[in-house]
Image (tube, rainbow, N blue to C red):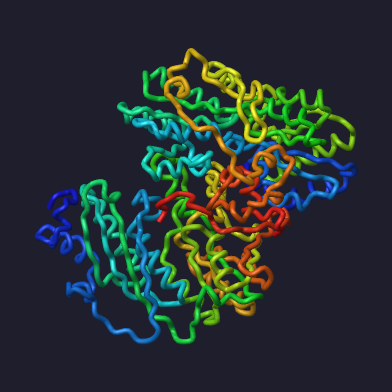
C-alpha cells in the first residue's frame, strides 16, 4: 500500500476497500462494525440522545491530543451534557490527498483508545478523499447516540435561582495548547490540552444527584460563552467569582501575550454543572474522586435578577459583566 | 516572581484601595491615556472601587481608534490595486473606513493576510516575488521599532516587494494638543506603560513642568493601575507635579535606546491626522527618503475619494475624553462589536468595546 493517501483511496474501489479493511475496521473492530452493512442496526430502550459535530482543528496533532481524540471526546461530551450514557458513534473522514498513511493510522489509533476510554463503539463510518487544497489534511465528523437514564432531566433551560455553578477544572488548556503549535504563532509551553471524554464523570455525578439541572461543556467561546447561553436559555442571571475559577499560570501568561481572556479560551474536557444548592456538596465530592475533576469547584451561583446576564465578582471585589464572545479568538481550534 | 498572579492579588488590591480612599480629599480627574489601561480598569471594575473624589476618563491611546478615516481609506484603496497583498495585524480587518473595511474588501476578493509579526509580512513578500506586499504600519512608539527593523531587514536581504504604509503616531504631541485645546481639565495623567518602555519617562516631563499635571507611568495589571492612582493622589494632595514610574519592571527613565535608534534611522517626524483631533504637527512618523523604496505612499498611486465620517459616531469626542460611550446614541444599539460603526467599538483597546464588554455605565 502507498504511504500517502491518494484520491483512489476514497473512490470506492480496491484501494478504498483495503484502507477501510486494514486501517479502520481492524483497528476499531466490534460486532456491529464488523458486519460492514450500510447501517449499524441495534436495539435501544428508553429516551435517546443524538448529536453530531465536525472537527477541523489545525494542527491535527497537538500537545495532549489529536483530531481523532477530539472527534470522540467532543461528541461523547455533547451526549454526556444531555445526561445520556454515550453508546455508539459514527466516524467520517474527509481526507486531503497526500496525507501520510502513518498520520492517518495514528489518528485512528487515537480514536480507538479514546473510544475505549469513553466506553463507546464506532459502529459506522465513511471515507472521502478530496484533491489537494480542498481540505486541510484531515477533517472528521462524528455523530453519536446515547441513552438517558430514567428520572434524569437535564437541559440548558433548567437552571433555577439559588442553584450552584460547578466547574470541573482549570480553563483554557486546550485552546492554548493548540495555539502553541499553530504555524506562525508557535511558542514553547508544557501545557497539554484538557481533551477528555466525560461520560464517566457525568455518570458518577448523576449517581450522586439525579437532580442536576443543567450541564454544558464549554468548548469554543469558552466558559464565558457557555454561561451566557445557560443564563439566556434558563432566563436567569449567573454570578461567578473570579478567584474561584481555576486557571493555570501558563494559560494566564499565554493569554497575556496573545491578548486573550481565559474566560473565552476553548476547552475540550471541561464541564459546567448547574446543581440545586442542597446537592452541590454531594456532586462536588463525587467529582473530586475522578481524575478529570480533581480541581472541581463551585464558581458561582444562579440568580433571578437581570435574566440572561452573567456577572463576575473580580479579584479586587468589584463587579463586571461577562459577555458572550464576539467573533472568533482564533479559528479552527476544534 | 511570576509577574501575573502577584499583580492580581485581592489582599494587596484591598490595601491599595483603602489607602486611596483614606488619602484622597481633593476632587481630581485623571486620564488614562492608553486603551490597554482602559481595558484593565473595566475588566477589574476599578472605577467602582475609587472614592467619589476621583474621576477617571479614557484618553486617545488606541492606535486603531485614532487612525483617521482618510488613512483607513488609503489602506483599503491599496488592497484594490492588482498584485498587492495587504499584510496587517488582525485587529485592523473590521475597522470601518469611509465606505468599506478591509474585511469587506477581502470578502470581495482583495488579498489581505493577517500576521502576528512584521517578520511574517517579510516572509509573505519572500514567498510571493511576483506580488507587492504592503504592511499596514499602525501603532505608537511601541510597534514602530519592529517595523523599522523589518524595513532594515528587507534592505539587507534585498527584498524589493515589501512596502510599509506608515500611519505610525507618537504620543507626547497629542497630549500637548489635548491640553492646549482646553476641552478637558486634568489633575493627573496615567502615562502609557509600553510606549514608555521605548521612549522612557523624560518625554512626559513637559506635562508636569509646563501644565502642572502629575504624571505616573503605569503597568497593565490591576494592581499596577491602583498603585499608579495612589501615587497620583499623593501628588495631588501634596500639590506637586512630577513624572514618576510605577511600572519599574518595564520602564527605565532613558527608555530603550536600541529601539529608539532603530526608529530614528528609518523614520522622521511628520504631521499626522488623528481622529477627532485633526492634524497634529510632529505627531507622525514618515519613512525617511533613504528608505523611500519601502514606502507605500511613494510607490503606489493611492486613489481615495474624500473621507466621510459616520453619521452620529462620536468616537472623536470619546478619544479626546470630552464624551463617554454612554453619551453616544449609537452605542450598544446600532453600534456593537458584531456590527461596529466606529473604531472604538472594534479595537480590543477601544473605550466603546471595553464599556460594552465589561459593563461600563450599565453596571455589573
Q: Is residue B212 left or right of residue B272?
A: right
* Vertical placement of residue B351 versus B281, above or below: below
- Which quadrant is home to the N terminus of chain B? top right
Q: Looking at the image, which residue is at 54% across and 28% down?
A: B167
Residue A129, position as x, y percentages in the image = 21, 55
Q: Quick one: which residue is furthest to the left in this view?
A: A14
Viewer-proximal residue among B251 and B70: B70
Q: Looking at the image, which residue is at 30% across and 56% down?
A: A139
Q: State whether residue B2 appears in this view.
A: no
Q: Looking at the image, which residue is at 42% across and 34% down?
A: B79
Residue B12, position as x, y percentages in the image = 75, 48
Residue A158, position as x, y percentages in the image = 56, 77
* Vertical placement of residue A281 versus B277, above or below: below
- Which quadrant is home to the C terminus of chain B? bottom right
Q: Is residue B189 left or right of residue B307?
A: right
Viewer-proximal residue among A205 and B222: B222
* Vertical placement of residue A223 versus A119, above or below: above
Q: Is residue B233 left or right of residue A159?
A: right
Q: State whether residue B30 appears in this view.
A: yes
Q: Quadrant of residue A309?
A: bottom right
How many numbered discs, if any? 0
Residue A164, position as x, y percentages in the image = 62, 72
* Vertical placement of residue B319 versus B5, above or below: above
Q: Quick one: which residue is furthest to the front in this view?
A: B306
Q: Looking at the image, which residue is at 21% across and 49% down?
A: A131
Amino acid at each position: 500500500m502507498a504511504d500517502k493517501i491518494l484520491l483512489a483511496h476514497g473512490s470506492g474501489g480496491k484501494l478504498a476497500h483495503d484502507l477501510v479493511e486494514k486501517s479502520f475496521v481492524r483497528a476499531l473492530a466490534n460486532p456491529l462494525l464488523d458486519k460492514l452493512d450500510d447501517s449499524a442496526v441495534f436495539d435501544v430502550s428508553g429516551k435517546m440522545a443524538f448529536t453530531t459535530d465536525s472537527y477541523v482543528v489545525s494542527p491535527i496533532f497537538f500537545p495532549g491530543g489529536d483530531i481523532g481524540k477530539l472527534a470522540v471526546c467532543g461528541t461523547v461530551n455533547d451526549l454526556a451534557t444531555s445526561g445520556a450514557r454515550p453508546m455508539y458513534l459514527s466516524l467520517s473522514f474527509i481526507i486531503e490527498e497526500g496525507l501520510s498513511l502513518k498520520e492517518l493510522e495514528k489518528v485512528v489509533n487515537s480514536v480507538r483508545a479514546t473510544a475505549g476510554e469513553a466506553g463507546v463503539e464506532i459502529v459506522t463510518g465513511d471515507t472521502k478523499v478530496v484533491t489537494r487544497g480542498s481540505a486541510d489534511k484531515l477533517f472528521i465528523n462524528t455523530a453519536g447516540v446515547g441513552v438517558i437514564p430514567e428520572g434524569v432531566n437535564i437541559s440548558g433551560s433548567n437552571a433555577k435561582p439559588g442553584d450552584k455553578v460547578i466547574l470541573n477544572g482549570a480553563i483554557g488548556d486546550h485552546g492554548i495548547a493548540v495555539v502553541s503549535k499553530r504555524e506562525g504563532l508557535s511558542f514553547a509551553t508544557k501545557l497539554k490540552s484538557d481533551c477528555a471524554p466525560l461520560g464517566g464523570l457525568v455518570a458518577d455525578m448523576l449517581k450522586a444527584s439525579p437532580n442536576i439541572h443543567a450541564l454544558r461543556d464549554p468548548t469554543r467561546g469558552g466558559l464565558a460563552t457557555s454561561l451566557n447561553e445557560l443564563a439566556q436559555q434558563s432566563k436567569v442571571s449567573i454570578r461567578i467569582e473570579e478567584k474561584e475559577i481555576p486557571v493555570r499560570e501558563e494559560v494566564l501568561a499565554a493569554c497575556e501575550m496573545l491578548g486573550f481572556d481565559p474566560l473565552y479560551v476553548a476547552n475540550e474536557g471541561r464541564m459546567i454543572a448547574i446543581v440545586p444548592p442542597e446537592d452541590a456538596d454531594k456532586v462536588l465530592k463525587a467529582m473530586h474522586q475522578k481524575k478529570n475533576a480533581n480541581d472541581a469547584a463551585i464558581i458561582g451561583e444562579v440568580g433571578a435578577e437581570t435574566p440572561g446576564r452573567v456577572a463576575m465578582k473580580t479579584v479586587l471585589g468589584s463587579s463586571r459583566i461577562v459577555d458572550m464572545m464576539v467573533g472568533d479568538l482564533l479559528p479552527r481550534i476544534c | 516572581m511570576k509577574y501575573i498572579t502577584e499583580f492580581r492579588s485581592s489582599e494587596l488590591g484591598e490595601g491599595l484601595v483603602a489607602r486611596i480612599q483614606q488619602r484622597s480629599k481633593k476632587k481630581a480627574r485623571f486620564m488614562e491615556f492608553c486603551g490597554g489601561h482602559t481595558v484593565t480598569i473595566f475588566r477589574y471594575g476599578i472605577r467602582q472601587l475609587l472614592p467619589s473624589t476621583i474621576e477617571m476618563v479614557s484618553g486617545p491611546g488606541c492606535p486603531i481608534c485614532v487612525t483617521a478615516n482618510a488613512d483607513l481609506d488609503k489602506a483599503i484603496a491599496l488592497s484594490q490595486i492588482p498584485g498587492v497583498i495587504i499584510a496587517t495585524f488582525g485587529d485592523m480587518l473590521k475597522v470601518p473606513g469611509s465606505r468599506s473595511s478591509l474585511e469587506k474588501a477581502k470578502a470581495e476578493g482583495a488579498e489581505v493576510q493577517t500576521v502576528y509579526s512584521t517578520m511574517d509580512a517579510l516572509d509573505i513578500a519572500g514567498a510571493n516575488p511576483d506580488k507587492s506586499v504592503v504592511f499596514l504600519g499602525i501603532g505608537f512608539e511601541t510597534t514602530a521599532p519592529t517595523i523599522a527593523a523589518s524595513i532594515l531587514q528587507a534592505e539587507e536581504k534585498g527584498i524589493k516587494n515589501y512596502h510599509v504604509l506608515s500611519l505610525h503616531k507618537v504620543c507626547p504631541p497629542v497630549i500637548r494638543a489635548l491640553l492646549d485645546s482646553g476641552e478637558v481639565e486634568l489633575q493627573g495623567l496615567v502615562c502609557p506603560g509600553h510606549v514608555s518602555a521605548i521612549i522612557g519617562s523624560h518625554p512626559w516631563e513637559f506635562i508636569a513642568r509646563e501644565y502642572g499635571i502629575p504624571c505616573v507611568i503605569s503597568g497593565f495589571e490591576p494592581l499596577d493601575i491602583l498603585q499608579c492612582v495612589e501615587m497620583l493622589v499623593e501628588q495631588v494632595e501634596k500639590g506637586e507635579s512630577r513624572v514618576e514610574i510605577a511600572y519599574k519592571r518595564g520602564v527605565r527613565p532613558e527608555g530603550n535606546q536600541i529601539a529608539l535608534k532603530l526608529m530614528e534611522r528609518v523614520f522622521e517626524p511628520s504631521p499626522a491626522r488623528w481622529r477627532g483631533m485633526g492634524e497634529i504637527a510632529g505627531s507622525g512618523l514618515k519613512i525617511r527618503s533613504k528608505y523611500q523604496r519601502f514606502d507605500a505612499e511613494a510607490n503606489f498611486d493611492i486613489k481615495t475619494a474624500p473621507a466621510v465620517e459616520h453619521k452620529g459616531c462620536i468616537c472623536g469626542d470619546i478619544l479626546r475624553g470630552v464624551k463617554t460611550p454612554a453619551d453616544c446614541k449609537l452605542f450598544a444599539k446600532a453600534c456593537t462589536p458584531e456590527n461596529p460603526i466606529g473604531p472604538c467599538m472594534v479595537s480590543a483597546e477601544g473605550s466603546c468595546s471595553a464599556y460594552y464588554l465589561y459593563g461600563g455605565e450599565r453596571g455589573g
